[in-house]
Amino acid sequence: MSFVKMVEMVDILKRAAYDGKYGPYPNPNVRKAKIMVKVVKSLHRNFGVRQSKDQLRKRWPDLKIREHDQYRRIRRVLQKNK
């Protein structure tokens, strides 16, 4: 996945509070599934990328933990765009 596509994915996940840090949610798995649908639709609409929700769901923790430098770069790009 290219850097621009990852920026799009992280932007949607951050705006929707995917990690659930902002409060108790009654059905966190349902909420996360709905957010992932938004990510899938956005990536397909903007970049023509067809990836499943499961692939993207696995990509998110990998990006935060294993690819921390790239995640930091993405956060900087998003902060500059605000």
Image (tube, rainbow, N blue to C red):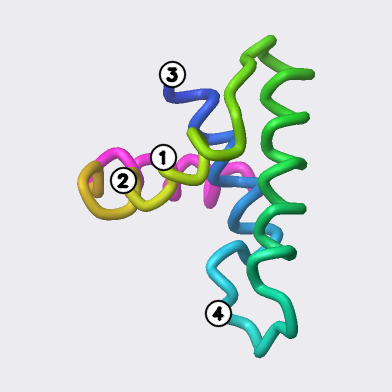
- Which residue lies at the image location 63% right of the left edge and 83% below the top edge? 22
Near mark 1 (Cα within 10 A), the count class, few <14, some 14-19 or many ≥20, is some
- Which residue lies at the image location 69% right of the left edge and 32% below the top edge? 40
- Mark 4 secondary-structure assignment: loop
Question: Toward which corner of the image does residue 20 lie, by quadrant?
Answer: bottom right
Of the two numbered discs 4 and 2 in the rendering, the one whose residue sits closer to the viewer:
2
Q: What segment is highlighted magenta in the picture?
A: 69-82
Type of amino acid under label 4: Lys
Please name the residue that numbered disc 3 is placed on: 2
- Mark 2 secondary-structure assignment: helix
**Dot placed on the residue nearer the N-terminal end, 3 or 2:** 3
Please name the residue that numbered disc 1 is placed on: 59
**Dot placed on the residue nearer the N-terminal end, 4 or 2:** 4
How far apart are the alpha carbons under marks 1 and 4?
Answer: 19 Å
Near mark 2 (Cα within 10 A), the count class, few <14, some 14-19 or many ≥20, is few
Please name the residue that numbered disc 4 is placed on: 21
